[in-house]
Image: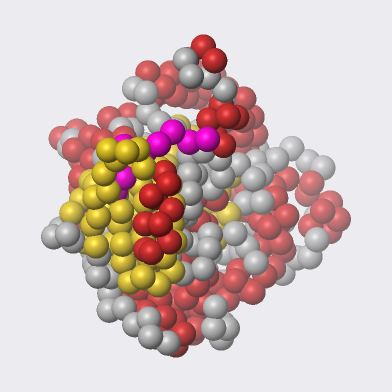
Amino acid sequence: MTDDSFDPLYAAAHPAPLDSVTLYSAPLIIPVTGPVIMDGAIAVAGSRVVHVGTRRWVLDTLKQDLAPQGRIEEHHWHGVITPGLINAHTHLQYTNMAEVGKGSYSSFRDWELGFNPVYENLCQEGDWKQSAEQGARMMVEAGVTAAADIVTDPEAAGALASQGMHGVAYWEVMDWHNDDWRKVGVRELVRHLGRMRQEDLPSIGISPHAPYTLETAPFVDLPDIARQLDMRLHIHLAETPMEAGDRETTLSTYSAASWRDQDWTSYQQLREAGQGASAIQFLDQLGSLGPDVHIAHGVWADTEDRRILRQRGVGVALCPRSNRITVTGRDAPIREYLEEGNLLAVGTDSLSSSPSLDVLDDVAMLYDLAREQGYMKDDLTHRLIRMMTLGGAQELGMHVGAGRIGQINAGAMADLAFFDVPVYVATPRGIEDTLEELVRNGAGTNRATVISGRVVYNNGAW
Ligand SMILES: [Zn+2]
């Protein structure tokens, strides 16, 4: 068939014979979008998965797919293979700010005061590009293949791309009053986004920082601008005590009418007026929320706030370790989020508020917190695995379509992580124990990482 007669529909149903296939086999594979597979194999050609199943089935099936001279190269791994993990909230640029994350603070404000001078100093003398790329490399070594990365200074924008990672680089917008925003802010935003586009970054988004660093106008304009440019949004929301509602509200659509009809300059002004609305309710009222938005932290989210997030299709990136270091005042309501069915993912935040960029460190803490808060169901391990893979993909809008990540199935991006945890597959209980071991003690055990079919890290895995 010549190129001018290329018919994508025909090609999809009649794939060309494969010349070269890499087979990753292991005693246990977790595809996330299908049941776990014992004695499994993943066949990868180019950047994509072509088959996943038991090793015997995949080898049988490949016989029909291979070209006459086609070759299979097998890499056997003795541990567990998962989709590449997804870090749903980080600032790779702050990798060089670990000294801030190692400090101890009495309040969120105290942490900010610790952060600011170190940041200012690095703006003068630091190298944000090097810092950000070093962070991206740390994530790759931990089995993370995609991230929601917030970029505050332009030099840091290429961090994900530097490692061939997937995800979104979100340009951060913060510290604007309404007037300055209209006069200067919009123009500045357009200039920065234009520059990021010229760098051919795979995916760019916008991060309106938080309700306490931006007044109302940017929270109205930024979603509109992002949506016109086909970009996603990511907001620090319900992280600090001042973002909590004063009381448990119900169905704010009706009950909050007392503040809805006024033009508020800022969330701060609304609070000072003695209105009990939470930051989530305020942004919801401005139209800033929607299924193209995910928020970081979601610590101060009451029943009504969580309902709003579900109703709008807004996912939460939970960052439990960061919340302790920055003194957010409480842990996120993990039990309630799980029981009520909110969309969840896991973020490490940056090294300026966390000891590592290993998502599994936060997953282990989420396991303990969920149990301490009284979540007793035996699906916890499975749900945490979903959060650190498919949940993250969903919050980044990358869970469906040709470029889908966070899952292992035919046609998906071949993003894989290889964990060195003891595998017991002789009994169903043994499999559950293996999954629990991965979730609770998997941090630091990744031995190889594949992104888009390329081995980008191999610490003696094969
Ligand atoms: Zn953050």
| Residue at the image point whose x is 23% and y is 57% from the top | 75
Residue that protrudes farthest toward the front in the picture: 68
Apparent side of residue 311 relative to residue 452 in the rendered image (left or right)? right
**Does residue 366 appear anywhere in the picture?**
yes
Q: Quadrant of the C terminus?
A: bottom left
Q: How many labels does the image show?
A: 0
| Residue at the image point whose x is 31% and y is 62% from the top | 25
Residue 436, x across and y down, in percent: 40, 79
| Residue at the image point whose x is 70% and y is 50% from the top | 312
**Does residue 241 appear anywhere in the picture?**
no
Corner quadrant of residue 65: top left
With respect to residue 74, does 232 lie above or below? above
Q: How is the image coloured?
A: secondary structure
Residue 461, x across and y down, in percent: 18, 61
With respect to residue 337, does 266 lie above or below? above
Residue 189, x across and y down, in percent: 47, 24
Residue 83, x across and y down, in percent: 40, 56
Judge by depth and name the residue closer to the eye, 441 or 84: 84
Corner quadrant of residue 7: top right
Span highlighted in magenta in the image:
14-22
Q: Is residue 290 magenta?
A: no
Apparent side of residue 394 relative to residue 328 in the rendered image (left or right)? right
Q: Does the magenta stretch include residue 18?
A: yes
